[in-house]
Image (tube, grey):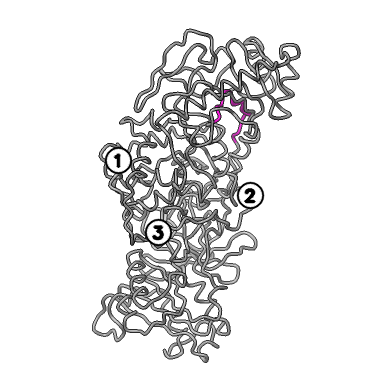
């Protein structure tokens, strides 16, 4: 299970790995840095070189010996090989061009471009810990990315103990180094001790490699093990004695209790919002998904690109920017990395490698910032706590969650100006719950999340307003056209919990669409939901959504029923409509929906479902507070920028939540500390 290798034996080991069909990837010198990339063999390693690092500073210098792994860390580890910066997810065959309307898909194919399996050479303990974090993101939840899973499973890992920690390392305080422990995932573990290596086997693949070396793999000795133990212990003691530490104890709660700390402003005065920290971090995973559709090509590609939460587009939706200020972007990165990560993936997102400190142009030190907040917390006594939820459990989808199916548009119903309902026929049986959403897309423009606004037989209803390029293209579809569909995703309205209770539904504008499925269920089952009240606000009478249907639910309104005629007899549904403004002929309520709430007696004991513009939601919740409604009696639907819908792209991060996976339906108390807070 262990052996001694000379430098010649190590050289032969890498040759044997290459002969076994692996592409060698390891540290090598390029552009004045030690980078992680393709190598031909041992001669390409940074033999005799080391790196000097300080905040905002990185330099190479010669060591004066023949150490193969005598450096600390380059700007990137194996993240680039396991999650490439640019990766094709699917290829879509395109239909013919039309004079008007978007080009529609005719077929979807997986993009399998794995190539040779990789042999990852020279990984340190902190990098193995970072890979474990990435495993949790890409394969540890209900959704599994098959591309990452295949690369990870096929990868051969040759790890190396770190006996000379760098100036910026703090892995001891994050429990991720400096030695590669036996429980880590590796095939071989090396300890470089002068002119030789102690090699320890961690898998059957590793054992086969050692066996293949024959006499080159000499028996290990007790002296070698003692030298390794002493070297790792000395490195750990050195790290323990340094001022640079990261105290993880209670850190998520500390950060989320100090979202308004003045330190964020001090950071913003220095931070360039360049995103360098996110590009060198071995655990960051944010990305965007784009369409590559050349004008005359028969196919388009859906492509994943690395992204950063420091970019302007990362949190932009419908033209609104949720984090326009640098303080909000840095706070987002740091609170996610050190706080939300724990509830989402069961571990901190920091492995103590110090890369973000070295490669920050202005030398911002994440450990220094945490220490400053910990030394002088300023959370007010009456601050609303931010809930830190346990790991999310949502229904899993079989197969690749990024691979869409082709669905056919059966009909298009114009609801309002620039608002249509697409009746879409998916392939096979499609099961969903009211409140969930699908990702609808077209190859020319991309995907957008659209709530399922109902079901008619085997057809799924999606009510869409034309607000951006993708939604405008979807609105322009005609019956018979095809589109891509992924889903269903997200949480649903808690219909089971509402049984036996009086329910009040409060909707604004297009916010009625995500509630429609739940309303239909409650309308159809008066025995389960004894009293249902809908308070609905629109800008004008002409912008009332689903007017025929919602008015038919209330028997006091003389109107031809379209659904559930038994309800008209029971009278368990009451509909109250208001508009912001109307012509003189309008005889209904005028004013915002909160004004309507004050006109109608509402019970503190009822259960409430709320959906609409976020500003409306906040004012509705304020009204509910005044009448004593408890937060655990209210559910609401949130909206953010979503590209993957499975909690992998990071774009819908909302404090400790992913809107796509933990929401979009939340109970009020789960997000009370974030609602209305700038930057979230």
Along the polypeptide, which appears first: circle 1 or circle 3? 1
Could you give the CA–CA distance between mark 1 and mark 3, rounded to whole angstroms? 23 Å
Picture residue at 34% right of the left edge, 59% below the top:
383
Q: CA distance from mark 2 to mark 3?
A: 38 Å
Crowd tier of the residue under label 3, counting other residues whose Cα lies within 10 Å: few below 14, some 14–19, many 20 or above:
some
Q: Is residue 345 above or below residue 67?
A: below
Check if mark 1's residue and mark 3's residue have beta carbons within 8 Å: no
Report the side of 103 relative to 626 (left or right): right
Query: Helix or strand or loop: what does disc 3 sit on?
Result: loop
Q: CA distance from mark 1 to mark 2?
A: 42 Å
Q: Which residue is mark 1?
A: 267
Image location of residue 255, percent across then percent down? 39, 48
Magenta-highlighted residues: 113-125
Relative depth, front residue between 671 and 545: 671
Q: Which mark, by number, is residue 385?
A: 3
The reply, left or right, for residue 315 in relation to residue 396 is: left
The answer to which of 279 and 469 lies nearer the viewer is 279
Q: Report which quarter residue 534 is drawn in.
A: bottom left
* 2 or 3: tag closer to the N-terminus: 3
**Earlier-in-chain disc, 1 versus 2:** 1
């Amino acid at each position: 299970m262990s052996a001694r290798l000379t430098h010649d034996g190590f050289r032969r080991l890498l040759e044997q790995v290459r002969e076994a069909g692996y592409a060698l990837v390891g540290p090598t010198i390029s552009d004045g840095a030690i980078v992680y990339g393709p190598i031909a063999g041992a001669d390409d390693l940074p033999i005799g070189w080391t790196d000097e690092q300080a905040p905002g500073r990185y330099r190479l210098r010669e060591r004066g010996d023949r150490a193969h792994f005598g450096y600390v860390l380059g700007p990137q580890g194996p993240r680039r090989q396991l999650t490439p910066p640019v990766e094709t997810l699917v290829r879509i065959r395109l239909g013919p061009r039309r004079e008007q309307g978007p080009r529609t898909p005719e077929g979807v194919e997986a993009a399998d471009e794995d190539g040779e399996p990789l042999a990852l050479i020279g990984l340190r303990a902190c990098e193995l810990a970072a890979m474990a974090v990435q495993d949790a993101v890409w394969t540890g939840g209900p959704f599994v990315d098959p591309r990452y899973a295949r690369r990870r499973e096929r990868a051969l890992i040759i790890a190396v103990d770190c006996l000379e920690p760098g100036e910026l390392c703090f892995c001891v305080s994050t429990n991720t180094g400096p030695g590669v422990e036996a429980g880590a995932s590796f095939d071989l573990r090396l300890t470089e001790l002068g002119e030789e290596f102690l090699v320890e086997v961690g898998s059957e693949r590793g054992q086969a490699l050692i066996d293949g070396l024959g006499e080159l793999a000499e028996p290990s000795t007790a002296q070698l093990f003692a030298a390794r133990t002493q070297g790792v212990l000395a490195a750990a003691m050195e790290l323990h004695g340094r001022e640079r530490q990261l105290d993880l104890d209670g850190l998520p709660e500390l950060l989320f209790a100090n979202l308004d700390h003045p330190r964020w402003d001090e950071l913003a005065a220095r931070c360039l919002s360049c995103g360098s920290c996110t590009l060198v971090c071995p655990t960051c995973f944010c990305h965007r998904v784009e369409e590559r559709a050349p004008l005359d090509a028969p196919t388009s590609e859906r492509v994943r690109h690395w992204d950063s939460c420091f970019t302007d587009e990362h949190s932009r939706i419908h033209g609104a920017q949720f984090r326009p200020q640098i303080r909000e972007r840095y706070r987002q990165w740091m609170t996610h990395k050190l706080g939300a990560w724990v509830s989402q993936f069961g571990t901190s997102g920091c492995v103590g490698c110090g890369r973000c400190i070295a490669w920050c142009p202005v030398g911002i030190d994440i450990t220094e910032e945490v220490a400053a907040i910990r030394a002088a917390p300023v959370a007010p006594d009456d601050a609303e706590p931010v809930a830190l939820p346990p790991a999310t459990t949502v229904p899993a989808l079989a197969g690749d969650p990024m691979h869409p199916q082709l669905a056919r548009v059966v009909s298009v119903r114009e609801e309002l100006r620039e608002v249509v309902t697409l009746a879409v026929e998916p392939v096979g049986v499609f099961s969903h719950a009211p409140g969930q959403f699908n990702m609808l897309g077209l190859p020319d423009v991309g995907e957008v999340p659209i709530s399922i606004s109902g079901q008619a037989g085997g057809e799924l209803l999606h009510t869409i307003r034309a607000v951006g390029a993708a939604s405008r293209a979807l609105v322009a579809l005609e019956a018979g056209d095809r589109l891509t569909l992924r889903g269903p995703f997200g949480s649903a309205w808690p219909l089971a919990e509402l049984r036996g209770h009086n329910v009040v539904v409060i909707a604004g504008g297009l916010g009625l669409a995500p509630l429609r499925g739940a309303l239909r269920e409650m309308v159809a089952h008066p025995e389960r939901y004894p009293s249902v009240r809908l308070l609905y606000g629109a800008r004008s009478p002409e912008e009332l959504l689903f007017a025929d249907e919602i008015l038919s639910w209330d028997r006091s309104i003389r109107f031809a029923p379209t659904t559930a005629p038994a309800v008209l007899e029971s009278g368990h549904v009451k509909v109250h409509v208001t508009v912001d403004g109307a012509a003189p002929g309008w005889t209904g309520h005028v004013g915002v929906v909160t004004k309507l709430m004050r006109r109608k007696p509402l019970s503190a004991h009822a259960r409430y479902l709320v959906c609409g513009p976020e500003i409306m939601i906040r004012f509705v919740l304020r009204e509910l507070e005044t009448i004593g409604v408890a937060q655990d009696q209210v559910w609401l639907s949130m909206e953010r920028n979503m590209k993957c819908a499975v909690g992998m792209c990071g774009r819908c991060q909302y404090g400790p939540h992913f809107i796509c996976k933990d929401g979009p339906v939340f109970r009020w108390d789960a997000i009370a500390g974030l609602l209305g807070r700038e930057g979230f």
